[in-house]
Image (cartoon, helix red, strand yellow):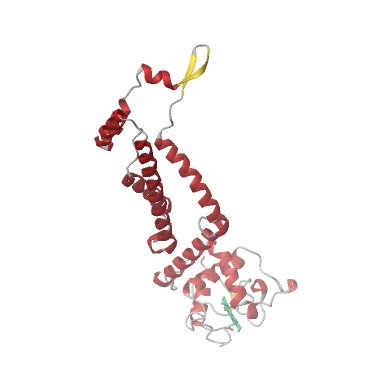
Amino acid sequence: MRPRTLLSIFIAAVISIIIFEISDTKDYTSLPSFWGLMVILSLMILILSSIGDLVENARFGAMNDLEKKQYLEDKATPYFKKLWNSAFKKQSASEEKSLLIDHGFDGITELDNALPKWWLGLFYFTITYCVIYLVAFAFSDYAHPDAEYINEAKLQAAAIKDYEKTAPAVSIETASYSADNIAEGEQIFNTNCVSCHSQGAKGGIGPNLTDNTWINIKQKSLFKNVFWMLENGSPNNPAMKAFIKEGIITGRDAEKVAAYIYHINREKNPVTVAQGGAAPQGTEADWQE
Ligand code: HEC
């Protein structure tokens, strides 16, 4: 009779495969489904082992005395020694004869060897795994790409929030122009500024921000001048609020809006009166950058 795999080895192998599979799931030990799976698996392994015991007893009962003696001797050999021996064991000529399948071609014949247990184990495992995976995929969030995406997106949003909390605030000294901020700056402009400065900042209640005439020239560079306005508001007209100081937008947002205004003012043509822009107000500015 072939040696049976030790129960402890079987359990260790199954559990390590499962843990390896789910080890990138965050804190799986707190999931009830994980422990449920462990219990079901343990029960299945115990049932398998008991069936193995029954089969072994039945076979033992059917043996003659010589076979029984041989069997008990086999059983006394430690499991790993048996494995070691079997790795180097060669079938005797008579054993081979009984395994020979009675067909051949061009002198090529076949032996009806039993499949190795580890191979069969893997085979059954993949079948079981496939069923579990398909059911989980169809009816639960486990391994579902949509659920994984939503989860990742949530984590990322939380990480960004965290970053915003701890990142140093952007001030007029540290703010700098970046073309990457233009698109986001436009969004912030459309939310906070468009009511007075109109679409594309062509001017309305507030002045035209696309031309080169400025009422407030507080800084040498255009980018910093816009930031200054957002930090301090207009000294002449309370309608233009100190957006940063009043906590309406953050310095980080101001850096983005300023990039947008810089872009439409310096890198695009002004929106003229003929095109629906507000008439120039203030004096011609001579920005250093
Ligand atoms: C409630 C209306 C209102 C809103 C909203 C508003 N502004 Fe203004 N803004 C004005 C007015 C009015 C002025 C002119 C101030 C003055 O005369 O000094 C102005 C001036 C400015 C100036 C200076 C222009 C110059 O010629 O000196 C900038 C830059 C500016 N606003 C940017 C913004 C940005 C960016 C936002 C959005 C975050 C914004 N404003 C929102 C009304 C507004």
Q: Look at 57% across and 65% down and name the residue there.
A: 182
Compared with 129, 167 (above or below) is below
Q: Look at 27% across and 34% down and name the residue there.
A: 72
Q: In this view, does 214 lie to the left or right of 271?
A: left
Where on the picture, by quarter, is residue 279? Answer: bottom right
Q: Is residue 74 left or right of residue 118?
A: left
| Image location of residue 99, percent across then percent down | 43, 22
State ligand 1's quadrant: bottom right
In the image as oriented, which residue stretches furthest toward the right?
Answer: 274
Compared with 47, 78 (above or below) is above
Q: Is residue 199 left or right of residue 110?
A: right
In the image as oriented, which residue stretches furthest toward the top?
Answer: 106
Question: How many labels were placed on the picture?
Answer: 0
Which of 152 and 187 lies nearest the eye of the viewer? 152
| Image location of residue 20, percent across then percent down | 39, 50
Quadrant the N terminus occupies: top left
Q: Look at 34% across and 48% down and name the residue there.
A: 12
Which of 205 and 278 lies nearest the eye of the viewer? 205
Residue 168 seen in the current view: no
Compared with 99, 72 (above or below) is below
Where on the picture, by quarter, is residue 206? Answer: bottom right
Residue 117 seen in the current view: yes
Which of 34 and 174 lies nearest the eye of the viewer? 34
Q: Look at 47% across and 64% down and name the residue there.
A: 155
Which of 151 and 118 lies nearest the eye of the viewer? 118
| Image location of residue 3, percent across then percent down | 33, 35
Q: Is residue 230 left or right of residue 195?
A: left
